[in-house]
Amino acid sequence: MAEAKPKADKPGPLEYWRQWPLRVIVGGTLAFLYLPLITLMAFSFNDSRRNIVWKGFTLDYYEKALTNVAMMEAFRNSLTIAFFCTVFSVVLGALAAVMLWRFKFPGKTAAEGAMALPIVVPEICMGVAMLVFFARVMPWPQGLGYPLNLGAITIAHISFSFPFVATVVRARLASFNRELEEAAKDLGATEWRTFWDVLVPHMQPGLVAGALLAFTLSLDDFVITYFTSGPDTVTFPVQVYSMLRFSVTPEVNAASTILIVVTIILTAVGLQLQTRAEEKAKAQS
């Protein structure tokens, strides 16, 4: 006969009293982080040119934002850059993670430090460095026009995004059981087949998380984009900043809210894909 499990004791008043400082700190931190965003989103529906005075609910400023040709072109530019940045960052980050995780070679410590530089260096320094590189160092063939274009922005975004992907994927690889790889080789699998059928499925949750991180970093980036964008290539954050220089209007709030909502939706989709990938990896193991 199975023994009855002891019932968990309910926390008493003393336990609640001990936990309330932590709850207050967590609640205050969440309020500090999210109240400004909630306020911005609320005032994007304000029927007034002055944000400090609420005069009523309206969707006019969303209509103005969505029918703004320059803003929609900037949004398309941001999505295009973020897409290519994500693809190349995931490939480069995954290969770099596997290299640093599996192999030992001279200068590995220096390579690991170089991988961490884009993460720790201030964005303003990265932006200036990219500006100097594209304007003075990198040769641009005739016919490509001004060097600071969508291609330059995409290269700059890849350069600071793929180390984040490499860090996430390498953390995932730390839990990999190398005996599975050896077993696959014993059964006749080639090096490439072992990598694709054994290692990649284990890396999949890290790849999804890295792709989500690279996409959101690229989509929301302003500092590096500001330095590497030319007069004819404007992204959505730069466009919002150019609107903000005149005044903080509900149209600016509406544009910012659109970017926030897009980021939240993509984050939710990415987390869902990551959860499914983790469940699939657990089922296969």
Image (cartoon, rainbow, N blue to C red):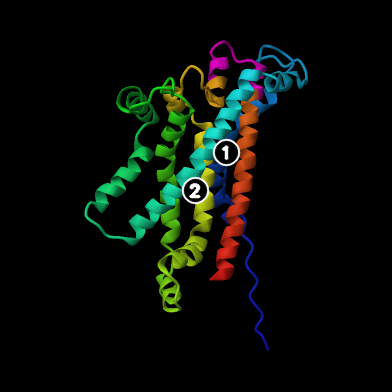
Location of residue 128 in the rendering, given as x and y in whole percent from the top left corner: 35, 25
Image quarter of residue 162: top left
Image quarter of residue 145: top left
Q: Nearer the viewer, mark 1 or mark 2?
A: 2
Q: Is 112 rendered above or below residue 284?
A: above
C-beta proximity under 8 Å, tags 1 and 2: no
- Residue 1's disc is none
- Residue 210's disc is 2
Q: Residue furthest left?
A: 106
Q: Is 17 rendered above or below residue 33?
A: below
| Magenta-highlighted residues | 241-254
Q: Residue at x 61, y 26 (%)?
A: 256
Q: Nearer the viewer, residue 81 or 174?
A: 81
Q: Residue at x 43, y 52 (%)?
A: 94
User: Badge 2, how many Cα within 10 Å: few under 14, some, many 20+?
Assistant: many
> How far apart are labels 1 and 2 at the CA level?
25 Å
Location of residue 69 in the rendering, given as x and y in whole percent from the top left corner: 65, 19
Q: Residue at x 37, y 51 (%)?
A: 96
Q: Assign the magenta stretch its main secondary structure.
A: helix
Q: Residue furthest bottom?
A: 1
Q: Residue at x 40, y 38 (%)?
A: 159
Give the amino acid type for the residue marked by disc 1 in the picture: Leu
Give the amino acid type for the residue marked by disc 2 in the picture: Gly
Name the secondary structure under disc 1. Answer: helix
Q: Which residue is mark 1?
A: 30
Q: In the drawing, does residue 184 fall left or right of residue 120?
A: right
Q: Is residue 246 magenta?
A: yes
Q: Is 33 rendered above or below residue 20?
A: above
Q: Could you tell me if residue 32 is visible in this image?
A: no
Location of residue 183 in the rendering, given as x and y in whole percent from the top left corner: 44, 76
Q: In the drawing, does residue 186 fall left or right of residue 26?
A: left
